[in-house]
Image (cartoon, rainbow, N blue to C red):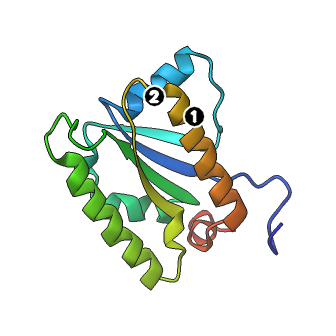
Amino acid sequence: MAEGESASWRPRIVAFCCHYCAYTAADLAGAARLQYSPSVEIVRIPCTGKVDVIFLLKAFTSGADGVYVAGCLDGDCHFISGNIRAKARIAAAKNLLAEAGLEPERLEMFQLSAAEGDRFRLLADEMTARIAKMGPSPIAKRATGE
């Protein structure tokens, strides 16, 4: 456990999920009663291409310890190239996080199809384990007043 970290600390992870693929995969995981980390808070968006860098950074300053964007597979975006735009924005946001002194690994993009409920569960758990290993975000601590 990192210095200053309480035994009851649980990572807070915000997942921006595309309505057509990732959100549907999350819904499928729920319908199949697949358990995934309760640390993940899903935000349904029309397309990953609508996620702006400012939204990603705002999630961190609002208390998230980790953030991920999950959308359609390459070539399957319902808005043609939304996921390609999202990849570029994720890369730019990772650079900004690194410049600010925060681990860029706290931000990730995943791609999956609507039929991959089990993969959604695995990705949510993988991201939770990654963030738990890093410990609380110093930005999240300041945002919550700890």
Q: Which residue is mark 1?
A: 121
In the displayed structure, 35 sits above or below 9; it is: above
In the displayed structure, 15 sits above or below 62; it is: above
Q: Which residue is at a point 68% across and 52% down the rendered structure image?
A: 129
Residue 103 pos. (x, y %): 54, 74
Count the labels in the image: 2
Kindly check if marks 1 and 2 are in contact, taking CB atoms under 8 A apart as contact.
no
SS type, badge 2:
loop
| Left/right of residue 119 with respect to residue 47 in the rendered view | right
What number is the disc on residue 47?
none
Q: Which residue is at a point 53% across and 23% down the rendered structure image?
A: 29
Q: Which residue is mark 2?
A: 116
Residue 146 pos. (x, y %): 69, 68
Label 1 crowd bin: few (<14), some (14–19), many (20+), radius 10 Å? some
Q: Judge depth for marks 1 and 2 and give the one in front.
A: 2
Q: Residue furthest top?
A: 31
The amino acid type, in three-letter code, at marker 1 is Arg
Query: Alpha carbon of mark 1 to alpha carbon of mark 2: how far?
Result: 9 Å
SS type, badge 1:
helix
| Left/right of residue 134 with respect to residue 102 in the rendered view | right
Q: On the image, which quarter does residue 34 sit in?
A: top right
Residue 49 pos. (x, y %): 22, 49
In the displayed structure, 117 sits above or below 37; it is: above
Which of the pair 48/81 is nearer the observer? 81
Q: Which residue is at a point 76% across and 55% down the rendered structure image?
A: 9
The amino acid type, in three-letter code, at marker 2 is Glu
Q: Which residue is at a point 65% across and 39% down the rendered structure image?
A: 37
